[in-house]
Image: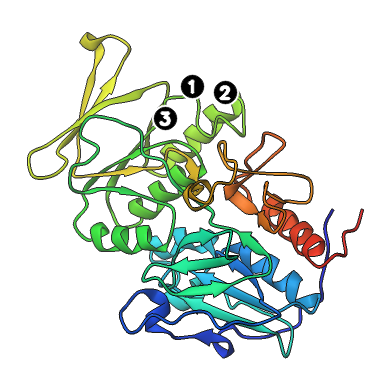
Amino acid sequence: MVLSFPEDRFELSSVLVADPAASGAGGAVAEAPEQDNAPVAVIGSGPAGVRAAQGLIRYGMPVVLFNAERWQPYNRVKLTPFLAGEVQIGQVYQPVEFPANAGIRVYSGCRIARIDRDAKTVIGLNGRRWRYSQLVIATGSRPHVPNIPGSDLANIFTFRDFDDVEKLVARAVRARDVVIVGGGLLGLEAARGMAAHGASVIVVEHEPNLMAQQQDRQAGAILAGDIERLGIAVRVATRVRRIEGERGVERVILSGGDAMDDETIATDTVIFCTGIRSNIEIARDAGLTVGRGILVNDRMQTIDPDIYAVGECAEHDGHVYGLVSPGLEQASVAAANIAGRPKD
């Protein structure tokens, strides 16, 4: 079920709450005031969280939205051209739009650390509490770094969010030989971004072809040829056995199946693009049922009927979707059900 709403414009900055106490930056801890009509709380301001907030507001419900990142909401698709130096930071930011006169408060740079289901409150890092009537968890996902010896050395990065890209932009000035671990879409985007700064880049993929979840070997071989014509080397059906170095990464040992066939690649920078894992910890600690994601029913409800989960942190019917479109649909479904207006 997909619900569409008119694109009424309302800038996030006009509802942004700059509150040091909320973000854990110090100051007195404020207890949530007692009120009869507590808002719907949305944890997470990614695409799914924002869509849920937009839907709830459209239904006339008060909302409090928590953005854990220190950045304004942004378009992840533009992180690669930003890394490559093709766009400026202002072009990466994506204004969040709400209907005029929206009943919403947005706390930016505010990470929710705990959910108190009995008191129906969410608690920030420094103990500040906000009451909720219903709660939407849209905490998204984080990069998965496999347990490879040496993966904790200096100059090893992930490529997922704006914090990652900030570090990579700084590193790109000195990076000369880069190994990208993971030949999926993010890996190829990271490879293009680092190559744009003049680095020598090698993509290592353990599957027989690039983007193995999206295409077969023949298509993967064609893609690999296109990537190599861009000056980026490709190794497929190859695993990283270990990463070595003294103060930082100096070489990557690739497994050829037999130790005698191992290949050593000199490198000063490694970027892991090896999938994602749902951010389920806050839900698990609150006693909600989790698997690979937070388990939800067709209404996007968890085992607590007043708590919903949407987006990359949610698991519905055995599936965790790492794509934007299903997350937006889930957010619309959750908003409709919270408002008591479900549709077929």
The mark found on residue 205 in the picture is 3
The amino acid type found where label 2 is placed reads: Arg
Q: In the rendering, at what x and y percent does residue 280 appear?
A: 51, 47
Q: Quadrant of residue 267?
A: top left
Q: Residues within 10 Å of mark 3 (few under 14, many from 20)?
A: many
The mark found on residue 208 in the picture is 1
Q: Quadrant of residue 12?
A: bottom right
The mark found on residue 238 in the picture is none
Inspect this view and state whether residue 84 appears: no
**Is 119 rendered above or below residue 296?**
below
Q: In the rendering, at what x and y percent does residue 239 appear?
A: 35, 24
Residues tagged 2 and 1 counted as in contact (Cβ below 8 A):
yes
The amino acid type found where label 3 is placed reads: Glu
Q: CA distance from mark 2 to mark 3?
A: 13 Å
Q: Residues within 10 Å of mark 2 (few under 14, many from 20)?
A: some
- Which of 162/46 is in front? 46
The mark found on residue 217 in the picture is 2
The amino acid type found where label 1 is placed reads: Pro
Q: Residue at x 76, y 64 (%)?
A: 335
Q: Residue at x 64, y 61 (%)?
A: 136
**Quick one: label 2 or label 3, which is nearer the N terminus?**
3
Report the residue that reaches farthest toward the left.
246
